[in-house]
Image (cartoon, rainbow, N blue to C red):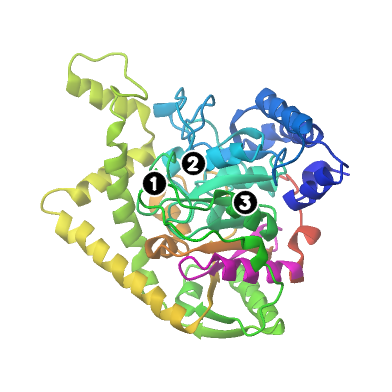
Amino acid sequence: MDITELTVHELQDKLNNKELTSEQITKAYIDRINEKEKDVGAFVTVCENEALNEAKKADAEGYNGAFKGIPIGIKDNLNTTGIKTTCSSKMLENFVSPYDATVVEKVKQEGMPILGKLNMDEFAMGSSTENSYIKVTHNPWNLNKVPGGSSGGSAAAVSANLVPWALGSDTGGSIRQPASLCGVVGLKPTYGLVSRYGLVAFASSLDQVGPITKDVKDCAMLLNIIAGHDEKDTTSYDRPKVDYCKALKNDVKGLKIGVPVEFFGEGINEEVKAKLRQAIEVYKELGAIVEECSLNASEYALATYYIIACAEASSNLGRFDGIRYGYRAKDFTTLKELYTKSRTEGFGDEVKRRIILGTYVLSSGYYDAYYKKAQKVRTYVKKQFDEQFKKYDVLLTPVSPTTAFNIGEKKENPLEMYLADICTVSINIASVPAISIPCGVDKKGLPIGMQLIGDRFNEETILNAAYTFEQKIKFRENYKPEFKKD
């Protein structure tokens, strides 16, 4: 038995039945990291000793917590006491937070060993994890391909069985797109369902923490842990507690699914379209009602997203000035020179690009023309989603316009890279939840993801729709990463 192949709910059963110990599970993952991390490059920091000590503690105390003793990986923009939080940037390469993010606190309260911090695009800005100052992460399905981004380290680690599950963050698709490219499950929850306290901010009105897992049941279980009101986060909603596992009925009879035609137009790879059409037929066989619909606001979503996200990024990243914390330039003579050199040397090209764009759209004379107009379009996008959810329970779209592309292929063409998010950004603008699940592979054996979008705080519906599809096609039983190279 390969312990690292098991899902979390399978590990949970084996712990409870005393077939495995937490130390055995954690050791198996550490051995796997030692074997495969050199090929994948998913980790910024590996916490081998800390994880093993926590596992031994869980074994000694007994598994009185539902997930006690089951290890996890954490994206490196979530604050962790005693472990560096770098955001994969030179600016924060030696930063150790004095406090835990709320989601990390919840994970620790469960007694879950943290295997380490996972690589990402610098400050979560990117779609390939090539913008990391630390290293480039490789896709386990083909090591010459990108894993997606910005949560590429989290998705690659789950896909390569380096962690049983992981936390990521999603600003415009940063959980769902890498989940799609790496053949795993990724959920972007409704904005406000999961606390953002302790998440290093990129775009505060768009960012959301969420799970990346091997299957949908694991996804529901991790959402159970991290969801909930947090007084430390003023954007956190106070709602009744929900057990998302109870939503997994394996039944979609009568479920109304809308398929927005705009998401299947120009720029979407033909193999991706073909797999999505096959998925639609599966839903019909399972008794769902599937109809085409229109969501034409999607054509404005990408421009709207990049205006709002860059504006908020330029504001949020203003704190990294070489004085309060973060990287400080060594040679300077004036305060202005200290600011300029510290930010020039500490930030990577993509971060600088977005700060400059964000500062521009917020500047006098351009604010009304760009930022204010983008906020009006955001309201229009939200209204369009609201209209669709009066008719449909779920919307079905691609996640990524293509399967995983080659490392270096789009790095020098920012516009082409931004287009990788064309199917995902409107979900963040509308603050609705969406899940990515694998629905097949292309001719080269690379995973293709399907996106299921739900109404606000209706995670149960999309989780059940995803779970029912997953039980039918059994993706994990039929396909596995091969760690091959072209």
Marked residue nearer the N-terminal end (1 or 3): 3
Using the rendered view, name the quadrant where residue 216 is placed: bottom right
**Does 433 sit left or right of 113 as displayed?**
left
Residue at the location (46% across, 45% down)? 411
Identity, as a three-letter code, of the amino acid under mark 2:
Thr
Identity, as a three-letter code, of the amino acid under mark 3:
Leu
Q: Does the magenta stretch include residue 276?
A: no
Q: How crowded is mark 1: few (under 14 residues within 10 Å), some or many (20 or more)?
A: some
The one nearer the camera, 192 or 425, is: 192
Chain part drawn in magenta: 442-471
Marked residue nearer the N-terminal end (2 or 3): 2
Residue at the location (37% across, 76% down)? 384
Give the residue pinned by disc 1.
233
**Does 50 sit left or right of 389 as displayed?**
right
Q: Residues within 10 Å of mark 2 (few under 14, many from 20)?
A: many
Q: Which dot marks residue 222?
A: 3
Q: Tell me the distance, in whole angstroms, between the alpha carbons under discs 1 and 2.
A: 9 Å
User: Residue 424, image x and y in percent?
Assistant: 47, 62
